Amino acid sequence: MALLKVAPDISMVHLRGSRMEYEDLEFGAPLGEGSFSFVFKGSILSKHTVVAVKKLKAPKNITELSIFDEFTREIWIMRLGNILFNPIPRTKYLLHSGLSHPNLVKFHGFTIDPCCIVVEFVGGGDLFSFVLKVL
């Protein structure tokens, strides 16, 4: 029986339009590490687009399984999250490809096996370091 039928939430069927094939990603230099992922500069081969790829760390034990919740939550926020930035009505928004605002990093998609989040590449380092330099 397909995972899609048994557990549609795990296969993230509600985000089907943003799902990508892992084989369509090319990984480049590592950019950093977060609490639940490694971040790489990469590209989407089929689109010839430079991106940042957040690759989920494998959980070491059962207590770390919450990283899958964080992964799903981040995709949800990036794809359908805060409608305050989008002027189109809510019903149309849910059909829209995702959040779009000049001050937000563009969400390109995600992969399931392994779990990756693909976003726009923004050079110049991380936001935290930039803020520290400005202050």
Image (tube, rainbow, N blue to C red):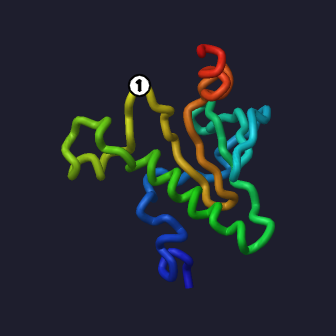
In this figure, which residue is indicated by the disc labeled 1? 102
Residue 44 location (% of width, % of height): 62, 38
Q: Is residue 37 left or right of residue 14?
A: right
Residue 79 lies, in percent from the top left, at 43, 47
Residue nearest the viewer, comparing 133 with 117: 133
Residue 122, quarter of the rendered image: top right
Give the percent coordinates (x, y) of residue 127. Answer: 60, 27
Q: Residue at x 70, y 49 (%)?
A: 35
Q: Residue at x 64, y 51 (%)?
A: 116
Q: Quadrant of residue 2?
A: bottom right
- Report the front residue among 91 and 2: 91
Residue 96 appears left or right of 60: left
Q: Position of residue 103 (x, y in %)?
A: 44, 26
Instruction: Tell how many labels.
Output: 1
- Secondary element at image label 1: loop
102 sits to left or right of 59 = left
Q: Residue at x 38, y 40 (%)?
A: 99
Furthest residue to the bottom?
1
Quadrant assignment for the N terminus? bottom right
Indicate whether 50 appears above or below 115: above
Which quadrant does the C terminus fall into? top right
Q: Residue at x 56, y 77 (%)?
A: 3
Q: Residues within 10 Å of mark 1 (few under 14, many from 20)?
A: few
Farthest-out residue, front: 135
Which amino acid does the dot numbered 1 rest on?
Pro
